[in-house]
Image (cartoon, grey):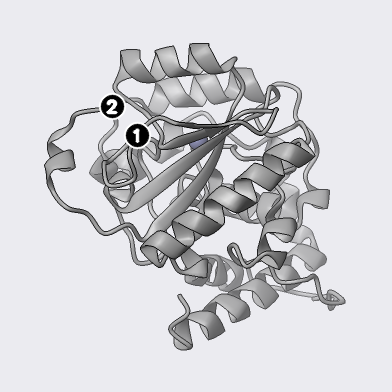
Amino acid sequence: MQKTAENSIKRKVSLLVFHCFALPTPQMIKIFKETGTGVHYIIQRNGKILSLVEEDKVARHAGLASWAEFPDSINAKSIGIELQNSQMGNQRYTAIQVKSLIKLAKEIIKRHGIKACNIVGHSDIAPYRKPDPGKFFPWRELAKKGIGIWPEVKNCVSVKSFERTKAVQMLKIIGYNVTDETAALYAFTMRFMPQKIDVRSNIIKKEAEVFSFWRGVAVENAAKKIKEAPKIYPPEAEKLWRDSEILSRIEQVSDVYKRERKKKNC
Ligand SMILES: [Zn+2]
């Protein structure tokens, strides 16, 4: 169990964050111990769930991150689940892993009353730093079981011209940090239109490079550092801004988030 000053405060859990990791589990646990980071649960490829940190304790799994009305301190307000995925999200999750994930997530949501809008991936809350849980994460399957938000794709109206400013505004409404606009768009697409994202062979190396750049950077300095930061998304991500189906999907998803928050579901 981890001991941090934050642990002594009785906390309110508002977010559930999904991650993935590429290393063998014992190695991952060793890194958590060495770096003082951690996560509440690990779900292995064989579906086995390991509990590493108690839910009422803080685990340092989110790092520099924000989402919607939560501008910082995501660790203090969340529970984290890591799924083993040797390609850092570029490999399909196993059926038994997904089954365990659904069971565990449902229990956590019920125990803490976590709202659907606040069930997120690491890439949602840290779009310029993190690629996990990746394009194969089963958001659609989870939403069918009442976990998180993933509206079915409507016949995407072809938007002829779409102002980038308007799209950025909508990404913000959903909850994304738009300090790096393309990073937010890439994270959105990975989650809500994954077929538009290519599998990346260099993602593990890239993630390590981006991780070491951001290590130790305080949240208030992030905006200043963003220009010189290595990008977690590939250069071709810029072309997503010209994809009318994606832009129309942003509009659809942001409408759903707006509606759900109005109904106080979120
Ligand atoms: Zn992560």
Q: Is residue 6 above or below residue 201?
A: below
Where's residue 7, x and y in %?
A: 18, 40
At 55% from the left and 18% from the top, the residue drawn is 25
Please indicate whether residue 107 sits to the left or right of residue 54 in the image.
Answer: right
Find residue 246 and report its horizontal and vertical position in percent: 75, 63
Q: Residue at x 12, y 42 (%)?
A: 8
Mark yes or no: residue 175 visible: no
Task: State left or right for residue 239 relative to residue 233.
Answer: right
* Ligand 1 within 8 Å, label 2 CB: no
**Mark 2, residue position:** 1
Residue on which the image places disc 1: 53
Residues 237 and 135: in front is 135
Question: Is disc 1 surrounded by few (<14), some (14 to 19) or many (20+) residues within 10 Å?
Answer: some
Residue 124 % position (x, y)? 53, 51
What amino acid type should be assigned to the residue bearing mark 1? Val
Earlier sequence position, callout 2 versus callout 1: 2
Quadrant for the N terminus in the image: top left
Q: Position of residue 154 (x, y in %)?
A: 82, 76
Q: Is residue 152 visible?
A: yes
Q: For this rendering, which residue is in front, 184 or 59?
A: 59
The answer to which of 182 and 258 lies nearer the viewer is 258
User: Is mark 2 in CB contact (under 8 Å) with mark 1?
Assistant: yes
**Which amino acid type is shown beneath numbered disc 2?**
Met
Q: Secondary structure at mark 1?
A: loop
